[in-house]
Amino acid sequence: MVLVNSGDLDLGDDQNPSLNSEVQTARGLTVDVRDGSAPISIKTGTRSLGSLGTGAPTTASFEVSVDENAEPGTYDVPVVLDYDYYSRISSGVRQQKSVTRTRTVSVTVSDDATFDVTNVDSNAQVGSTGTVAVTVENTGQTAANDSDVTLASQSGDLTFGEGTESTRSVDSWAPGETRTFRYDVTASDDAQVDSYPFQLNVAFDDPDGVRKESTDTSVSITPDPEQEFSLSDVESTLSAGEEGTITATVTNDGPRDVDNAVIKWVSDKEHISPEETEIAVGDLDSGESTEVTFTADATDSAEAGSKQFDFVTSYRNTEDDRVESDTLEAQAQVSPDQDEFSLDSANTSVGIGQSGNIEITVTNTRNETLSDITAKLFASSPIDTDDDEAYIDALGPGESETITFSVSADGDALQKSYPVSLDFRYDDPDGDSSISDTYRVPIEVTDANGGGGLPLTAIGGVALVLVLAVGGYMRFR
């Protein structure tokens, strides 16, 4: 009902009009609706409306129910108004009076179809689309034909796709019959987990074919919180110039279980590329976690340090639509470029003027298996090599194998260390062939006698000269 204050003024104050307004204002206004003789029950108690001046009117709503055996017709319903007002203001003194007045309003009880919402079931969720099922009963005395049920959103955060209302239709709707209408409702990313108002309107034809409308039935819908996921326990074996992995634990933080979840790599890194951009993890209950591992290649140009990598979780919602989560950010380390192999040399000494075998243990320091490994030895005077190649079929991560080369030291070599160089040609798991950096290994040239004397070949030569010299001397005699 609409309440209007039409207060009179017997004598006003032209010098101070505000006092006139004070006298005409009803204060502490309460409104109470009584049943009277109408076949209705008032469900709302006394309403307190505060102050009401003679300006804009105010509105008060009361919920009522109609008796099942009510006779159609128009009834007078008493409305009791209680309020205070200043009957006189003089020299700053205000005289106050309390008033109780009764007015009547006309209420028409018809035998037309009327509608009550008996149940609202929603699986709408913040940031996605869900279904709202509204169950409505025809509580009237007659059938409704060709009915259009218009559900209208009162907020832009909950909508029907791009629109603010959606309509469902039903041909014949008998008295006492309930119907359930389903609407697709989208809750925006900005929606709150709060009650949002909707209006349910039913337009229908009565049995005489007259088009009528039942309006302003309120419906409240509260969306569930947005589906969330998180990443934890992030570990990385990425290293510039080789293949590595990022491993993380993905948790469904709820509030709902999800079906057919897929974790997607959505980072766009110039020098790091994953072998696969999606990993299927299947159904994931609320609170459940699973571990995923992405394998990626990092080029030699990849910068070392902590990098941010982005992922999303794709899943099917309750409407069987595939949707994606917000971006999941992970910090992972990229290690600097490292050598493919480490070398450990043994038996790498050779006597002056002699030949010998040197042994070098080769270890794969990469996180991937390297195969078809050919080692090449390079030496320069006074070190020489007659056997400068060795072959290893394959080395897994951390595996080692010892290879052998034959080297010699010239007779004029000094007793000290001389360097030789090695490099390796190998294939990675993708079948790409590469050549490693050059490695240096020291060769220790020693006294062949171990005591600082001349080598055996040199000693033999001196002995021969001496013999020849003695023989010559004897012949001279």
Image (spheres, grey):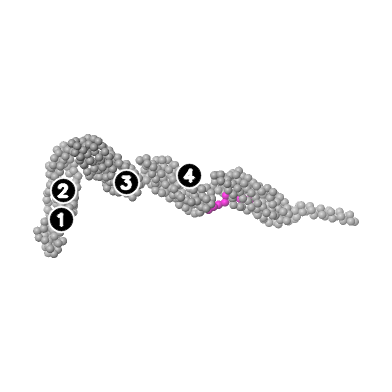
Find residue 417 and name its label: none
Say what secondary structure mark 1 lies in: loop
Label located before the other in sequence (1 or 4):
1
Q: Is residue 18 above or below residue 312?
A: below
Q: Secondary structure at mark 2?
A: strand
How many angstroms separate mark 1 from mark 2 (CA)? 21 Å
Is 30 part of what is drawn in magenta?
Answer: no
Q: Residue drawn at (64%, 49%), measured in percent from left and top?
A: 376
What mark, if any, has residue 32 been given in the picture? 2
Magenta-drawn segment:
336-345
Residue type at tag 1: Thr
Q: Nearer the viewer, mark 2 or mark 3?
A: 3
Number of the front mark, 3 or 1: 3
- Foreground mark, 2 or 4, reads 4
Mark 4 Cα shell of 10 Å, populated few (<14), some (14-19), many (≥20) = few
Pick whichever of labels 3 and 1 is earlier in the sequence. 1
Report which residue position mark 3 lands on. Answer: 162
Mark 1 or mark 2, which is nearer to you? 1
Whole-percent x, y for residue 251 in the image: 41, 45
Q: Give whichever of discs 2 and 4 has the lower sequence position.
A: 2
- Mark 4 = which residue? 276
Q: Please give the name of the residue rendered at 51% of the width and 52% of the height, measured from the top-left corner.
A: 302
Spatial separation of the CA atoms under disc 3 and disc 1: 42 Å
Looking at the image, how many numbered discs can be counted on the residues? 4
Amino acid type of disc 3? Glu
Label 1 – label 4 distance at C-alpha: 74 Å
Q: Can residue 241 be seen in this snapshot?
A: yes
In the displayed structure, would residue 55 be above or below residue 183? below
In the rendered structure, which disc, 1 or 2, sits on the residue that comes first in sequence? 2
Q: Amino acid at mark 2?
A: Asp
Q: Residue at x 61, y 52 (%)?
A: 439
